[in-house]
């Protein structure tokens, strides 16, 4: 077992299965040690009967008793093996499942910064191949370890009782195996880590290629991608071959040592039996080796039992080195700092009215250079029930502003308030429950359209689902699909158009019915008529609730209560659309350019 602090709680959780499994495994190991004695006794009985030292009937009776004993031992071994397989492998499978569950919970707590620094492919390999390696060691590794220790010690004691000199000669190479195992463990662990890192790179590249397959085809870059993949795959292959080579060499050396010991036992033991028969027992270092044929068969059978513990010892070293390397990667993930977390005794927002205020809010991304602020001294207030638009050039901080409101990043105390409560003093879950969010990338799950809209509450009735779709003006489009609301959206909504994805995302947010709703450039892919319908529905159906609309087009926000104009991360103006024409150069220019665009389009028509 790998006794790392994260693993202890799982061992304790499934301690009963481990105790029962190890006890049954020890019972099987103990029962096995009777078999060499039975075989030796059978050989002695046959020898005595052949030499006339015992009658045939008596010999047959003794052999029959031994055969019955063998059947009893076989029955005990059968039941014991069934039991330890069920318990130990069950426990290891549960540990893997529990560890994966805890890793998933951890992944939900980590901030966006962590996922910017670590690729999806690497994280997926931790959840798959690394966990499988840990599970293998917790299950089969435990079997190998118990067998190597208990069965090995038990057999060694039996061999010493038969002839300690011959046993000691047999044990010398075993010491070499143990020493060799400890020496090579770190090296094999390093090789396994290199193998897993190469697998991460392969996973990353494959995932990225499949995600961007449409771009690759559009730019006719299939051949270039294949060549790049071939290089990564070759490196992965070479690393795997290198690890396999070390592992095989280790296994082969153990097999050679075992074969050498067996040959030595047969040679020395056979000569010792011959010497006893001829009346001139063999003498080694002053010790008389007194072996007959039956004892030699027993000794060889004991050594045959010892072969598996020796192999298990080597396999345990190899498996432990892999498990330690994999566990190290998993532990690094579990120990990753959680940037976004609740304060002590957080305030839980309830009955939120939707009043939002920013006071001298300044924000810099964690990995940005010093002084490179995305937002600077942002101050404004949204009253409960107002519909607010946010406009400005690309990169001016519009999305950053709403992400800060969602507590996707840490902000300074006393800078953002919801209903008068400091955002940093509030419970994160209650903050996000109070806000319905339509993200800029319009992410949809690979599921039915119905389930995508009902994401906030899968138990909600179909009428409300359809009403939400009508709010987003996408109901008719869904009804035209062959399977209607049961149509699969495909991975990330690949089977839908950009406008359809946007509107389904809007329907999903509307269905949450939160006091605050944020739409981050969520109508950019729809036509003007559809945009007007959605904005009219917002005005009618979200009356009395706070709505924030980020837009690239001025027409999208021109009928809202107020508009916030951002310029280079600072507030240029915050007022009604009518007043902004007089006080905001940026807004005035955007209106002028949009009207000019309409005139040009009208002229073309």
Image (cartoon, rainbow, N blue to C red):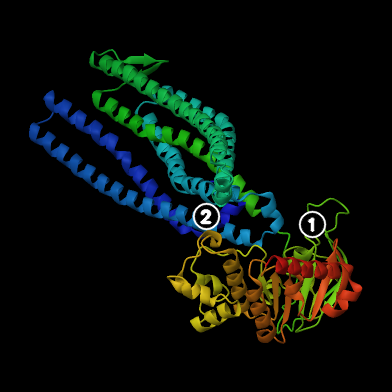
Identify residue for label 2.
11
Residue 528 found in image quarter: bottom right
Residue 397, given in percent of the width and then of the height, sits at 80, 63
Q: Which residue shows up at 55% across the image and 51% down it?
A: 214
Label 2 neighbour load within 10 Å: few <14, some 14-19, many 20+: some
Where 263 falls versus 86 (above or below)? Answer: above
Count of numbered marks: 2
Identify residue for label 1.
365
Where 413 falls versus 85 (above or below)? Answer: below
Q: State the residue lying farthest toward the right.
A: 583
Q: Estimate the spatial distance between the alpha carbons at disc 2 and disc 1, rounded to whole Å.
A: 41 Å
Q: Nearer the viewer, residue 599 or 487?
A: 599
Q: Quadrant of the C terminus?
A: bottom right
Secondary structure of the residue carrying tag 2 is helix
Q: Is residue 399 visible?
A: yes
Q: Which residue shows up at 42% across the image and 55% down it?
A: 90
Q: 533 left or right of 72?
A: right
Q: Nearer the viewer, residue 490 or 204?
A: 490
Where 115 falls versus 600 (above or below)? Answer: above
Q: Which residue shows up at 12% across the image and 39% down it?
A: 61
Q: 122 left or right of 351?
A: left
Residue 163 found in image quarter: top left
Q: Which residue shows up at 13% across the image and 28% down it?
A: 49
Q: Is residue 342 visible?
A: no
Where 283 falls versus 555 (above or below)? Answer: above
Residue 174, given in percent of the width and then of the height, sits at 46, 27
């Amino acid at each position: 077992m790998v006794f790392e602090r994260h693993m202890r709680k799982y061992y304790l959780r499934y301690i009963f299965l481990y105790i029962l499994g190890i006890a049954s495994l020890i019972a099987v190991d103990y029962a096995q040690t009777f078999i060499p004695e039975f075989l030796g006794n059978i050989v002695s009985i046959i020898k005595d009967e052949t030499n006339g030292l015992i009658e045939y009937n008596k010999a047959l009776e003794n052999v029959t008793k031994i055969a019955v004993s063998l059947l009893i031992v076989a029955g005990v071994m059968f039941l014991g093996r069934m039991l330890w397989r069920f318990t130990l492998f069950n426990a290891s499978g549960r540990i893997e499942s529990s560890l994966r569950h805890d890793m998933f919970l951890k992944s939900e707590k980590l901030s966006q910064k962590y996922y910017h620094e670590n690729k999806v492919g690497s994280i997926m390999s931790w959840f798959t191949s690394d966990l499988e390696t840990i599970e293998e060691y917790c299950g089969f590794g435990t079997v190998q370890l118990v067998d190597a220790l208990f069965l090995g010690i038990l057999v060694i004691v039996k061999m010493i009782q038969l002839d300690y000199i011959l046993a000691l000669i047999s044990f010398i190479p075993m010491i070499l195996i143990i020493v060799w195992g400890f020496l090579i463990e770190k090296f094999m662990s390093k090789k396994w880590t290199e193998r897993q890192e190469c697998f991460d790179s392969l996973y990353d590249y494959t995932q990225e290629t499949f995600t961007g397959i449409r771009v690759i085809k559009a730019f006719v870059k299939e051949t270039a991608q294949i060549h790049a993949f071939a290089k990564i795959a070759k490196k992965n292959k070479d690393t795997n071959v290198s690890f396999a080579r070390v592992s095989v060499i280790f296994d082969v050396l153990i097999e050679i040592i075992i074969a050498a010991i067996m040959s030595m036992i047969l040679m020395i033991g056979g000569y010792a039996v011959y010497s006893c028969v001829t009346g001139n027992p063999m003498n080694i270092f002053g010790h008389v080796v007194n072996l007959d044929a039956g004892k030699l068969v027993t000794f060889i059978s004991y050594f045959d039992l010892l072969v598996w513990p020796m192999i298990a010892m080597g396999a345990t070293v190899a498996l432990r080195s892999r498990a330690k390397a994999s566990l190290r990667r998993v532990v690094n993930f579990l120990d990753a700092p959680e940037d976004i977390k609740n304060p002590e005794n957080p305030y839980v927002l309830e009955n939120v009215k939707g009043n939002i205020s920013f006071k001298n809010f300044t924000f810099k991304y964690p990995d940005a250079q010093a002084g490179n602020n995305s937002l600077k001294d942002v101050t404004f207030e949204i009253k409960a029930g107002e519909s607010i638009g946010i406009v400005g050039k690309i990169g001016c901080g519009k999305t950053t502003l709403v992400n800060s409101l969602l507590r996707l990043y840490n902000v300074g105390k006393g800078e953002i308030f919801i209903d008068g409560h400091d955002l940093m003093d509030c419970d994160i879950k209650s903050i996000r429950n109070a806000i319905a969010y339509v993200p800029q990338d319009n992410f949809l799950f690979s599921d039915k359209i119905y389930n995508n809209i009902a994401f906030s509450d899968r138990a909600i009735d179909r009428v409300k689902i359809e009403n939400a779709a009508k709010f987003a003006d996408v109901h008719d489009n869904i009804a035209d699909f062959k399977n209607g609301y049961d149509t699969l959206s495909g991975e990330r909504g690949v089977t839908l158009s950009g406008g359809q994805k946007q509107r389904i995302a809007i329907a999903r947010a509307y269905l949450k019915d939160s006091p605050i709703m944020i739409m981050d450039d969520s109508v950019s892919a729809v036509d003007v008529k559809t945009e007007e319908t959605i904005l009219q529905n917002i005005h009618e159906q979200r009356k009395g609730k706070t709505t924030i609309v980020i837009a690239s087009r001025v027409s999208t926000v021109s009928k809202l209560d107020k508009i916030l104009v951002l310029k280079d991360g600072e507030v240029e103006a915050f007022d009604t659309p009518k007043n902004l024409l007089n006080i905001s150069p940026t807004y005035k220019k955007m209106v002028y350019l949009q009207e000019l665009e309409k005139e040009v389009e009208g002229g073309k028509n």
